[in-house]
Amino acid sequence: NAGVTQTPKFRVLKTGQSMTLLCAQDMNHEYMYWYRQDPGMGLRLIHYSVGEGTTAKGEVPDGYNVSRLKKQNFLLGLESAAPSQTSVYFCASSGIPGLLGALHFGNGTRLTVT
Amino acid sequence: AQSVSQHNHHVILSEAASLELGCNYSYGGTVNLFWYVQYPGQHLQLLLKYFSGDPLVKGIKGFEAEFIKSKFSFNLRKPSVQWSDTAEYFCAVNAGGNNNDMRFGAGTRLTVKP
């Protein structure tokens, strides 16, 4: 099993450009999450999904949109990138309600916005 | 919303030294507690977790953590660190029940000198 796979691994954007980060999991997990990791701030939840067709806002949702059209995929979109969105983005999934099973993380996407 | 504080930003130890990393959280209800480790260039991996029962939790690689409810703390310990323990350590808290919002601390970078 591949677990949680994120694409791309690296990306450089110019301010105002858009892009979509893809997260795919092959563990049949219901719950999927997008986090951003910034130095000195740990991980902060952007958006999450508790099942196919559902999404919810996390701690820092502004400037991002998400979609969960298929159970195995969770997409994170930046419509108009800003330098403040320079970060490392991690996708995670969980198979048990309330995060009792803890999170399975992808390898991250390093995004730089110039 | 719950928050998590990790007191030490960077800890430097020699091999065989004992380790204790502090973690405090602010949430008055039932919580699930986690420690994750991120080795250089890798994604976060679960070290250990506490849901209920014995407040002393043992995890992988000789790590353990103690939940002290009265102090809202969940400190991570290891009696004798190794060079391979060099990594960043994150404490995380999830409010009990169906809350899917896991909050992470800012992380503690551990450097173990050989």
Image (cartoon, helix red, strand yellow):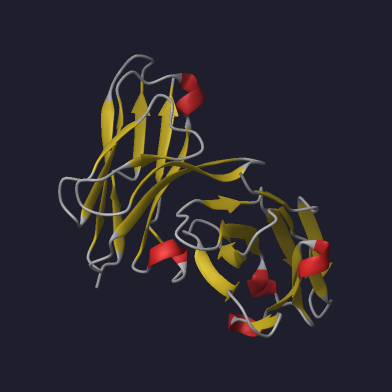
Residue B102's place in the image compared with A111, above or below, is: below
Inspect this view and state whether residue A103 appears: no
Q: Is residue B95 left or right of residue A101?
A: right
Indicate the position of residue A88 as horizontal and vertical percent values.
47, 41
Q: Residue at x 48, y 59 (%)?
A: B42
Which quadrant, please, contains the N terminus of chain A? bottom left
Indicate the position of residue B109 as horizontal and vertical percent values.
70, 56
Q: Residue at x 46, y 40 (%)?
A: A58
Indicate the position of residue A4 as horizontal and vertical percent values.
31, 60
Rendered image quadrant of residue A67: top left
Residue A52's place in the image compared with A64, above or below, is: below
Rendered image quadrant of residue B63: bottom right
Viewer-closest of A101 and B62: A101
Q: Residue at x 64, y 83 (%)?
A: B53
Residue B103's place in the image compared with A41, above or below, is: below
Inspect this view and state whether residue B70 appears: yes
Indicate the position of residue A49 as horizontal and vertical percent values.
32, 49
Q: Which residue of the protein is positioned furthest toward the top in this rendering?
A: A16
